[in-house]
Image (spheres, rainbow, N blue to C red):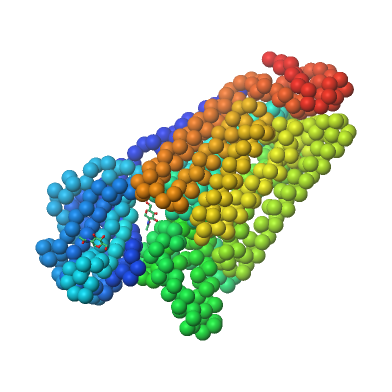
């Protein structure tokens, strides 16, 4: 079989990509922090830019800073270091003992010049080795500057907080590629199998591939919530943002920025100005933001009307700044920031990704059709190879484009709804309206069509499966809506679409209300898990277990999100540990699902009779579906179809067709 060598090669490629995940990177040891956040109102020392890097091999600390100090007093620094919410180190530094210029006593002024400090080589041994290698370490340094003289003596005049990172992360290019390649290959394999006439195997592979892609998307959606997430969760969910179309391609970003500007929008410049302004990655309603928000309100009261409008539109558009000048991102903007995409380009990025995929697919299918015709004319392939495809390729193309629309349904809905809160530019809001209507009307209309066809089939043949699975036109065009389900649950696409819309609403519109979001997601996922386990609507036992397992993990993720909102008032260490548990759980689930799908798809390609590998469905579908393993016995097929139509047995009776090996 020609596909043998190619599938071996693909398998190798995938395994190599998976290996890339586990191999450690040989980066230089370092500890760094990229923003200094105020952690008390009226902090006397604030920094709009703060980049600090400690490199043990060079025994140096490099600092880029832009800070303002209003403190004029003798001070002491009360420093605490914690990891995963557990405080393990604290010390009080008296700057007068260290001869730090400008700190003994502290003087007010601006601090703008980058500087370097040489540190004692023995310092390196104070930091345990694991601090440099543990990915997405959740470590924090908190410094109180307490006055020891003057009017404020004994009180803290400033509080500063910095998250420490070591540059190691689970946000890995290898994970992105491996997951994308496996999901993509599985979808392509199912298309190929179906083209070769193995429709039973094709629908199994497609059903698993769709479930897997759905799981990737729901992990990505965990990253979109406006809830403060531990670093490892932010990084891990970032690995799956490609499944929402959030892919950073440099020249496209330039086009998007140009498009937004030329349609009257103002582009965000968070990524642009990273060298001069720090970005705080966190939730909006943390205490330090409160003063800046009230400042805005106060400012509004005294500003002329037009300015007030401008200020409030700035507020709505996100890109929130603290009153000391650094940016704050959370939720969907945080994902954009971490993907190096300006927040104002995120919506267009996702939409365009999906339509680029669609355009490429259409072109490839067109070329393939041309190649098939040429090859058939030149007699390189047998006249009947891909015959179904060559005859009905337009319908098949429509079906595939519909399927991509279905895969893009969640991201397009979320980001279009979110665009209404961002209003990047008039043209982009119009685009959002258009795409929102397009995907929703398109898919709900298709579902309506499907239900009509099924009803007609019930009326004519007392069985919904008859027309749905026997008419190749229907199967190729609308099959994406129902082949993953058992025939009697053909309608299940409607609850799936409803679930997606509901989830999208809460993710897009409750960005500022993390708790609301978490509770809503918890209820939605609980509903999905219960429905899936009770109805078990998918085509067979394996795919039902596959999907129910995914629903269960989604539900657990929703519980974890609720924990991250701190509604339980748990100690920080619990939050830190839950973050790591979320990562381990999802990484393990992802790995298992990836291996399952790789192995089962590879086996399908290695067997001579792919369709025979799967138990034929107990729902009569195979008796109506044209499948090569069965075509040999047309007489038997007719008899089966007749039985299934209810000539003898009623609808729902189990029929087990003979499998010919
Ligand atoms: C400080 O800024 C310079 C120039 O932009 C850059 O090369 C350097 O890496 C920065 N240092 C830190 C600690 O980020
Ligand atoms: C500095 O002030 C903070 C906040 O008021 C307080 O918790 C801390 O104990 C003080 N540190 C010292 C060394 O006094
Ligand atoms: C620091 O990490 C904590 C979680 O450990 C997060 O809630 C907070 O938003 C982070 N702050 C910044 C500035 O990244």
Compared to 267, does 624 lie above or below? above
Residue found 78% across the figure and 46% down from its top = 448
Quarter location, residue 525: top right
The answer to which of 588 and 515 lies nearer the viewer is 515
84 to the left or right of 348: left
Residue 170 drawn at (x, y percent): 40, 44
Residue 125, quarter of picture: top left
Which quadrant would residue 199 be assigned to in this image? top right
The residue at 45%/62% (across/down) is 285
Viewer-closest of 262 and 34? 34
Q: Residue at x 45, y 37 (%)?
A: 585
Q: Which residue is nearer to you in this view: 54 or 261?
A: 54
One can see residue 661 in this view: yes
Which quadrant is the C terminus positioned in? top right
- Location of residue 459 in the rendering, given as x and y in whole percent from the top left corner: 88, 35
Q: Residue at x 61, y 58 (%)?
A: 416
The answer to whether 196 is drawn above or below residue 506 in the figure is above
Marker count (numbered): 0
Q: Is residue 344 above or below residue 443?
A: below
Say which quadrant the N terminus sits in: top right
Report the side of 167 relative to 517 (left or right).
Answer: left
Asked whether, in this view, residue 317 is left or right of residue 460, the answer is left
Q: Horizontal and vertical percent for residue 390?
A: 74, 36
């Amino acid at each position: 079989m020609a596909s043998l060598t190619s599938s071996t090669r693909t398998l190798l490629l995938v395994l190599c990509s998976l290996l890339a995940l586990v191999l450690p990177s040989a980066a230089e040891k370092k500890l760094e922090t990229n923003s200094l956040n105020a952690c008390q109102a009226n902090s006397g020392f604030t920094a709009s830019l703060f980049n600090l890097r400690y490199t043990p091999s060079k025994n140096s600390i490099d600092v880029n800073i832009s800070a303002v100090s209003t403190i004029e007093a003798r001070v002491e620094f009360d420093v605490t270091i914690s990891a995963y919410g557990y405080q393990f180190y604290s010390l009080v530094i008296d700057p007068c003992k260290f001869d730090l210029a400008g700190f003994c006593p502290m003087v007010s002024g601006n601090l703008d010049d980058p500087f370097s400090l040489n540190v004692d080589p023995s310092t390196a041994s104070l930091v345990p080795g694991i601090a440099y290698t543990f990915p997405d370490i959740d470590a924090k340094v908190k410094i109180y500057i307490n006055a020891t003289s003057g009017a404020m003596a004994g009180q803290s005049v400033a509080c500063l907080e910095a998250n420490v990172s070591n540059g190691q992360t689970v946000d890995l290019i290898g994970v992105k590629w491996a997951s994308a390649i496996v999901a993509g290959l599985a979808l392509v394999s199912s298309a190929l199998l179906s083209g070769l006439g193995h429709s039973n195997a094709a629908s199994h592979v497609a059903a698993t591939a769709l479930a897997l892609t759905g799981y990737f998307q729901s992990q990505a959606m965990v990253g979109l919530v406006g809830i403060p997430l531990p670093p490892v969760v932010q990084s891990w969910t970032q690995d799956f943002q490609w499944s929402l179309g959030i892919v950073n391609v440099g020249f496209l970003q330039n086009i998007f920025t140009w498009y937004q500007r030329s349609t009257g929008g103002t582009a965000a410049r968070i990524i642009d100005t990273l060298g001069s302004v720090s970005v705080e990655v966190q939730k909006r309603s943390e205490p330090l933001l409160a003063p800046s928000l009230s400042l805005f309100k106060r400012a509004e009261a005294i500003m002329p009307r037009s300015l007030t409008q401008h200020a409030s539109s700035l507020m709505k558009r996100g890109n929130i700044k603290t009153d000391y000048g650094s940016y704050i991102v959370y939720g969907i903007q945080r994902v954009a920031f971490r993907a190096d995409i300006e927040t104002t380009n995120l919506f267009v990025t996702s939409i365009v990704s999906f339509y680029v995929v669609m355009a490429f697919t259409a072109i490839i299918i067109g070329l393939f059709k041309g190649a098939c015709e040429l090859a058939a004319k030149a007699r390189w392939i047998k006249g009947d190879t891909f015959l179904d495809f060559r005859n009905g390729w337009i319908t098949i193309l429509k079906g595939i484009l519909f399927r991509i629309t279905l895969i893009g349904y969640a991201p397009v809905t979320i980001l279009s709804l979110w665009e209404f809160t961002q209003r990047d530019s008039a043209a982009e809001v119009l685009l959002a309206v258009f795409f929102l209507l397009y995907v929703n009307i398109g898919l709900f209309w298709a579902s309506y069509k499907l239900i009509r066809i099924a009803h007609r089939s019930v009326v004519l043949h007392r069985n919904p499966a008859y027309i749905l699975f026997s008419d190749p036109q229907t199967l190729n065009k609308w099959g994406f809506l129902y082949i993953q389900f058992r025939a009697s649950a053909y309608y299940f696409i409607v609850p799936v679409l409803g679930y997606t819309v509901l989830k999208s609403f809460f993710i897009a519109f409750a960005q500022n209300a993390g708790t609301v979001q978490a509770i809503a997601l918890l209820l939605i996922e609980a509903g999905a898990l219960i429905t899936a386990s009770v109805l078990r609507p998918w085509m067979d036992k394996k795919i039902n277990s596959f999907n129910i397992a995914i629903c269960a993990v989604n539900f657990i993720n929703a519980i974890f999100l609720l924990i991250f909102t701190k509604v339980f008032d748990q100690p920080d260490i619990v939050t830190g540990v839950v973050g790591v548990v979320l990562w381990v759980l999802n990484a393990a689930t992802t790995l298992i699902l990836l291996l399952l799908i790789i192995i089962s798809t590879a086996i399908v390609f290695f067997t001579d009779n792919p369709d025979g590998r799967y138990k034929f469905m107990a729902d009569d579908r195979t008796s109506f579906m044209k499948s090569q393993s069965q075509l040999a016995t047309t007489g038997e097929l007719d008899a089966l179809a007749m039985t299934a139509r209810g000539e003898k047995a009623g609808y729902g009776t189990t029929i087990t067709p003979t499998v010919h090996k």
